[in-house]
Amino acid sequence: MAMGYADFGGGPRMAAEHAEHGRELSTLTGPAERRPDVVVRLVARKERFEIAGRGSVEGYTLNHTSPGPEIRARQGDLVEVTLVNESVRDGMTLHWHGVDVPAAEDGVAGVTQDAVMPGRSFVYRFVVRDAGTYWYHSHQQSHEQVRNGLWGPLVVTSAKSGRDVLAAVHTYDKIRTVNGGYGERRTEVAPGSVVRVRLINTDNGPMASWVDGAPYQVVAVDGTDVNQPSLVTGKSVLVTAGGRVDLLLTVPSDGTAVRIGLGGGPTTLVVGPHGGAAPASRSAPADRVDLLSYGKPAPIGFDPAHANRRFEYRIGRRLGLYNGKPGLWWTINGHQYPDVPMFVVAQGDVVRMTVRNTSGQVHPMHLHGHHVVVLSRNGVAATGSPWRVDSLNVEDGETYEIAFLADNPGIWMDHCHNLPHAAQGLVTHLMYE
Ligand code: C2O
Ligand code: CU
């Protein structure tokens, strides 16, 4: 296996010998005897594609579109996705961002599989245990491949999810889009409908989002329900890069529509009846929902006060060489990937981490295969609903205390989801002993 065929330029190379045997490897971990409930075939190509309202751009597609097709499953379904790489030259994979799949299905080139080269295919099989809003994307040369189109939404519903509307945001070549379109996009629903807006931020930076025309509740964050969310008016909520937030609202019964603000630019989503007038577009309300104190406390299922492992990592910067290039590079405890020691845990451990950012910029830290609970920010303890995330927006100067249960054996990436930052060394791993 060549060094270059690993995301972020190198790393642990498990399973390199399985490069030619994708099917055998993946069926070892999925329930092979069970018939899949959802079967998807995604063909990846390098080609031009259309951005509705804006013309065409050069990039990558899945089944001739970007975003790729929405994958929709019900909680408990076995999902089988066949990835066929027709013409993505550097090879590619698919990673199920936010879905806590078995490690062998995680789709990280150079860690859990080799990149799928042009002319080859790979079959992913996994059970979706938790309902929620997720997305998928390539995890090979991610900073380039995700930006240029190799991604799509993934929604897992349960009996109580209700009617939903997708708002998957992505910036292609400085053009911010929602659901693949630029400018004011509309989704038609009947007056009086209760809808769950599934916000997905696939960009490299945080996005403020809000609703004009109706109050809303933040009902889920990163695929986990918020306990007893209160009604919000005139405030925005931050969607971390890579993160998802579900908003619940009732469309007015008087025939008007609501507008979903997406960062304050020209691209917004109007939800309501055909032709229904919506409030004017505006910039993001400065007042923000603080998830640290939003909703009501509930049990989290483990006791962070009795942690078996404690780690501390500090995100910093240093001037020097990285991959032979001089510059100001990101560090974790003074090191850069692949020279950052892994965090080693054992199955069943309660793990606590302190994440401190003194680097001068915001970093959306994403841990694969797990959801972490936020315990405190800058020493202020969480008082709201358990705030569970897989992608955490850590601003410069902030310190978060987080905890999680080590319940998913494997080697897992923990990296900045500002993907160019990951390519600049802001990557570490969690490994089970
Ligand atoms: Cu969404 Cu490691 O990635
Ligand atoms: Cu970063």
Image (spheres, grey):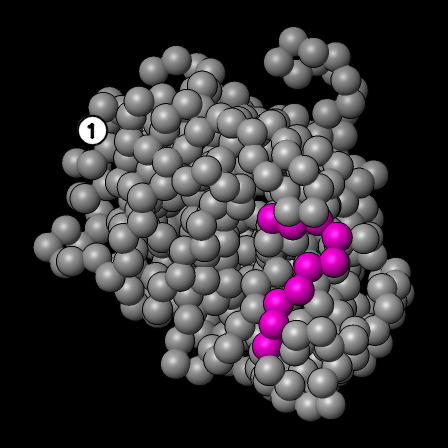
Closer to the camera in the image, 39 or 420: 39
Q: Is residue 416 visible?
A: no
Residue beneath the point at 69% across and 11% down: 325
Closer to the camera in the image, 29 or 402: 29
Q: Main secondary structure of the magenta part?
A: strand
Q: Which residue is mark 1?
A: 21
Residue most toward the front? 275
Residue most toward the top? 324
Q: Which residues are magenta?
A: 180-189
Closer to the camera in the image, 297 or 202: 202
Q: Is residue 9 visible?
A: yes
Residue beneath the point at 14% across and 58% down: 34
In x, y percent, where is residue 433?
35, 43
In x, y percent, where is residue 124?
29, 44
In x, y percent, where is residue 369?
43, 51
Q: Quadrant of residue 86?
A: top left
Q: Is residue 200 magenta?
A: no
In x, y percent, where is residue 330?
71, 30
Residue beneath the point at 52% across and 21% down: 9
- Mark 1: C-beta under 8 Å from nearest atom of ligand 1: no
**Residue type for callout 1:** His
Q: Is residue 395 above or below residue 44?
A: below
Q: Is residue 183 magenta?
A: yes
Give SS at disc 1: loop
Task: Say whether residue 195 is left or right of residue 77.
Answer: right
Q: Quadrant of residue 215?
A: bottom right
